[in-house]
Image (cartoon, coloured by chain):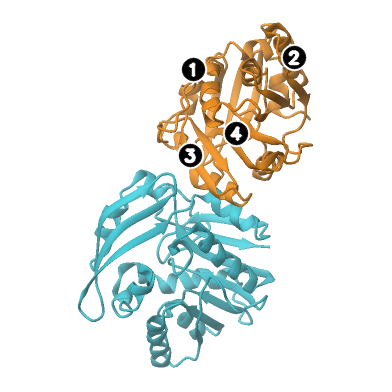
Amino acid sequence: MNQWYEELFSNFADKYEDESFTQGTIGEVDFIEKEINNDKNCKILDVGCGTGRHAIELTKRGYRVTGVDLSENMLKKAQENASNAGVEIDFRQADARNLPFEGEFDLVIMLCEGGFPLMETDEMNFQILESAARSLDKKGKLIFTTLNGLFPLFHSVKDFINANSESQKNIENTFDLLTFRDKYQLEIEGDDGNTMNLNCNERYYVPSEITWLLKSLGFNQIGIYGCEIGAFSRDDPLTTESYEMMVIAEY
Amino acid sequence: MKKWYQEMFVNYANEYDKEDFTRGTEGEVAFIEKEINYQKDVRILDIGCGTGRHAIELARRGYSVTGIDLSESMINKAREKAEIAEVEVNFEIADARNLPFENQFDLVIMICEGAFCLMETDEMNFQILESAARSLNKKGKFIFTALNGLFPLYNNVKDFINSNSIEKVSGEYKFDFMTFRDRSTHEVLDNEGNKRVLECEERYYVPSEITWLLKSLNFNKIDIYGCKLGEFSRDDELTTEDYEMLVIAEH
């Protein structure tokens, strides 16, 4: 049986790009460039690249990027977007839990929940971090965003999603305090015009958990910040108001 | 330099036994007995046994118990109390991060923050869990309590401690969202009635963290509950109002 994230993205490439949370690409890439000191030699891996918005923008600016995603459908759209933009990118279908790379990237990015907190078990989510860490050169940097476990303790995720997305309807939302998993039904119109009804399950992590997981993968320098769409910044402290957090890790 | 948890227990054994939070011993032991099906041949290790209140009560009920604590003063008091109670308990001074036991206990208990949560790094706290796991035989059970990370997000720990304890939290109380560590200044009365001021730091864990840490030590069955002093119960669901959580783990 397909997981909800497989089903969703098999039919949600065009509409994905209309979502408000996918409009921050330029600002996010500005931040990423600064983090790698605008060094054009930097080899970049984008895990869960989706329709390739960050990968394409980075390539436009002169970086070599490899983009991987589980969804053939999203990658097809990414290829299309790349050829429209007149850039060439190595897009590959791959499972983020088991990537075929070893120490070959200077920067690994994983933005907008393209893989990490979507898995059905915590072990699988950890495999994604392991995979990302393994792909990275020992002097490299890992930058990713993920769902902030502090947010659902003080806010209704359902209200937040429903207020911020026109296409999604989030219903029957329950946040479990023991597992920090948010389960909900998602009603969403697919690219084919039909409404999909999906049973979703996402894991929210508190900062101390992320720190622990990254330390156990050998990362020593771990910075966790707030995460404003389109305006990533190291000056943005994480609070209970941040829906996502931005994590920057180095060995 | 001595850590606060070493300083505190040097001269706090008599006062400790007067604290409200140490009054639940009988009810807690009743729960523990039920968890081991009243099997009198169960060998029990009590980590961070303090003045031996659980160890002595268990010995009184016919179990063979080893109690370890980092504090010589607490162990001395425990030995005194065991003698008065006319029971035999094997009390030893030992560091919970590095216990000299291997597979030799059927039950390991660690109650009332005797060690875990008090360490200055998360790695040291994990070493305590590792040590406990190593001491336990593969069919054994691990029962412990820990500070509930959900509590300080909704409650003022300072007010809570001050209304429930002889020890007083003075000065600014600070809970850090990034580390889930709580720093506070405690005023305690020592055995001579002198007021002593200690800078303390304690780690609160959310349930999902505890589950992850225990799974990585190969525990498969992990149950987490609320924790009412003196009335531990599997029917007590963990909420944001529980200052502590009760954890029961099996391989």
Q: Amino acid at mark 2?
A: Arg
Q: Is residue B177 visible?
A: no
Q: Amino acid at mark 4?
A: Glu
How far apart marks 4 and 2 lie (CA) works out to: 28 Å
How far apart marks 3 and 1 lie (CA) works out to: 24 Å
Q: Is residue A179 above or below residue B49?
A: below
How far apart marks 1 and 2 lie (CA) works out to: 27 Å
Query: Chain A appears in which tint?
Result: cyan
Question: Are tags 1 and 2 found on a single chain?
Answer: yes
Q: Which residue is mark 1?
A: B164
Give the x, y percent position of residue B174: 53, 33
> Tag 1: Cα neighbours inside 10 Å, few (<14), some, or many (≥20)?
few
Give the x, y percent position of residue A214: 61, 58
Helix, strand or loop at mark 3: strand
Q: Is residue A45 visible?
A: yes
Q: Quadrant of residue B242?
A: top left
Q: Residue at x 47, y 59 (%)?
A: A121
**Mark 1 and 2 residues: CB-CB less than 8 Å, in contact?**
no
Q: Residue at x 55, y 44 (%)?
A: B210
> Tag 2: Cα neighbours inside 10 Å, few (<14), some, or many (≥20)?
many
**Mark 4 and 2 residues: CB-CB less than 8 Å, in contact?**
no
Query: Chain B appears in which tint?
Result: orange
Helix, strand or loop at mark 1: helix
Upstream in sequence: badge 2 or badge 3 = 2
Upstream in sequence: badge 3 or badge 1 = 1
Which label number is shown at residue B202?
4
Question: Are tags 2 and 3 found on a single chain?
Answer: yes
Q: Amino acid at mark 3?
A: Ile
How far apart marks 4 and 1 lie (CA) works out to: 17 Å
